[in-house]
Amino acid sequence: NLVIVPHQIFTPTVGNIKSSFLDDISNSIPIGLVYDGYKKDNVDMYIISGSGIYSKNARRFFEQILEIKSNVPFDTAIYAPAVALPQNIATLTYLGVDLFDSTAVLIASSQDMYLTTYGFYDVNQLSELPCMCQDCSSLSHQNVMSMTRKERFSFLKKHNINVIKAELANVRQKIKDGCLREYVESQSSSSPLLTSLLRHSDNNPTYMEKITEIVRSRTLIANTSDSLHRIEFSRFSQRTLDRYSPPDNSVCLILPCSARKPYSFSQSHQKYIKALGKYRKYIHEIILSSPLGVIPRELELTYPAAHYDIAVTGHWSEDEKKIVADRLSSYLKYKSGSKKIVAHVEGAYREICERVSLELNIDIIYTATGKTTSKDSLSNLRKTVSLLLDESSNFRNLEPRKMLKSIADYQFGSKIGEILVPNNSIIKGPYPKYQVYIDQDQIATLIPQYGILALTIEGAKLIADENKYTVYIDDFIPKGSILVPGIINVDPDIRPKDEVIVKGPRVICVGRAVMSAYEMMNSSYGIAVDIRHVQKLDNS
């Protein structure tokens, strides 16, 4: 049971109406309050006041949800009364609403509205019932139209309630499967309001980025224009700029992406690699991709670079071109240095490179004559690169060590790769199941599924003083999972599924974050970290 305290119409400074109710309620009973801009203690649910009115204005509705989510404890439920319909449940859930009611469904039923997950029909305009549920399959449209007003309301109520219950179950399954965002994109196309809500969220990504997983096991499907603005893609681009250190080579080579991933496994990239031959060791390779932008070769295995799928048509929208051009421009501006730049690209890829060349006032040499995989193009690529190199050209380390250093930097922060994967480290195992050793101690393992590193205790000790991706706990020895009440502080960069170090007065551990740093510090219960290895400290 949950007690909803009556709404206080006066400002919080006038009277004690709300607090007088709270004083009479046992602390053991969950409490719900209308959100009025102030966070209260021991409240289990906040109600969006006037959500039925806000639901007609996407910007105001989004801002109201965002304000509440940003100002109340993360584990406090949000209830939006009188707005839930099968069509919008997924989007509202994605934005952070937890609880719904049947008010809007009952109103729709009274207005002869026949609800579906993609909208509604006026039952009077239907020629047949587009549903095979038990209530609908036993009736024809003619049967429904011959009903009295009361009977038709009863029928529509049953159908509409069944549809919204089924959609709630569907949304829960999408959350479990890790593909709610893809489903929301498909749903939003059926309604301008839902599209606006999603785009307001994408245009204000700060809150959502904090709670978005760093990896996931399911392929990321990017089939709509809204997919271009997904947090996973913008985060990869920003981390590459902030953390990745390109090799100090003489030539930067821009290549097109491929359908097969990792890219180096594709037939086209195998041809590029073969054409470059002995000259490849002098080259810094980057891959252009929509919707990611720029992917350094060393990070091609790291999520989401090898984990997304898009509809390939050969046609790029203007939004795609702009996003990729902006990311290439930023990369070349801050990461290319004085390198000579070669682009082995065609079509939209070349158009993007030409835009960036004009913007940055830099020279880019183009080597493709028609298809990038033609004999003439590949021959021209090899010849051009060979002429650009000289005896002073820097040597690129093609060993696995360089890739693992780059992944460590991307994952834990700039310069961490030098600590975890120093020049005296030994790399064991076949690609991509690499293991890092220093002397006889295993430091980390590359997880092929995600393209990130899993630390051992010895690896954690090496970077423990850097205080990166660290959860600080109270004085206890973990036995499986770290719960929120045991946490003292966290690195704010931690996101769900991040590899983390756990430090306490008597222990050091490694594991995988279940929550983000924001969730850990703004929740009162729940599993925060799944622990993999635990070691007591010598002073314990």
Image (cartoon, rainbow, N blue to C red):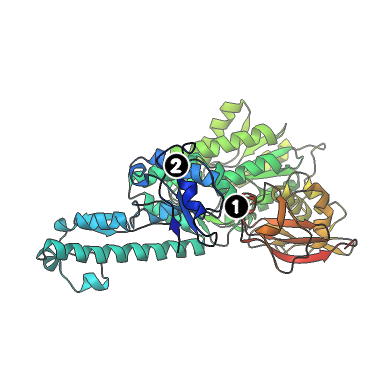
Whether residue 193 is situated above or below residue 263 in the rendered picture? above
Q: Nearer the viewer, residue 289 or 451?
A: 451
Q: Nearer the viewer, mark 1 or mark 2?
A: 2
Q: Which residue is mark 2?
A: 64
Lower position in the chain sequence, tag 1 or tag 2: 2
Say few, some or many: other residues with alpha carbon within 10 Å of mark 1 (under 14 / 14 to 19 / 20 or more).
many
Q: Nearer the viewer, residue 220 or 351?
A: 220
Q: Give left or right: position of 194 versus 125.
A: right
Q: Give left or right: position of 15 versus 162.
A: right
- The answer to whether residue 421 of the structure is visible from this angle is no
User: Could you tell me how far apart the alpha carbons at marks 1 and 2 are, in whole angstroms?
Assistant: 34 Å
Q: Quadrant of residue 482?
A: bottom right
Q: Give left or right: position of 250 versus 13.
A: right
**Element class at badge 2:** helix
Q: Which residue is mark 1?
A: 305
**Element class at badge 1:** loop
Residue furthest to the left: 146
Q: Amino acid at mark 1?
A: Ala
Q: Amino acid at mark 2?
A: Gln
Residue visible at 49% across and 59% down in the picture: 179
Residue visible at 49% across and 40% down in the picture: 37
Residue 395 is situated, as x and y percent measured from the top left of the image, at 80, 44
- The answer to whether residue 220 of the structure is visible from this angle is yes
Residue visible at 22% across and 72% down in the picture: 137
Residue 499 is situated, as x and y percent measured from the top left of the image, at 70, 57
Total count of labels: 2
Q: Nearer the viewer, residue 331 or 234?
A: 234
Whether residue 306 is situated above or below residue 16 in the rendered picture? below
Task: Say which quadrant the N terminus sits in.
Answer: bottom left
Q: Quadrant of residue 534?
A: bottom right
Residue 143 is situated, as x and y percent measured from the top left of the image, at 12, 68
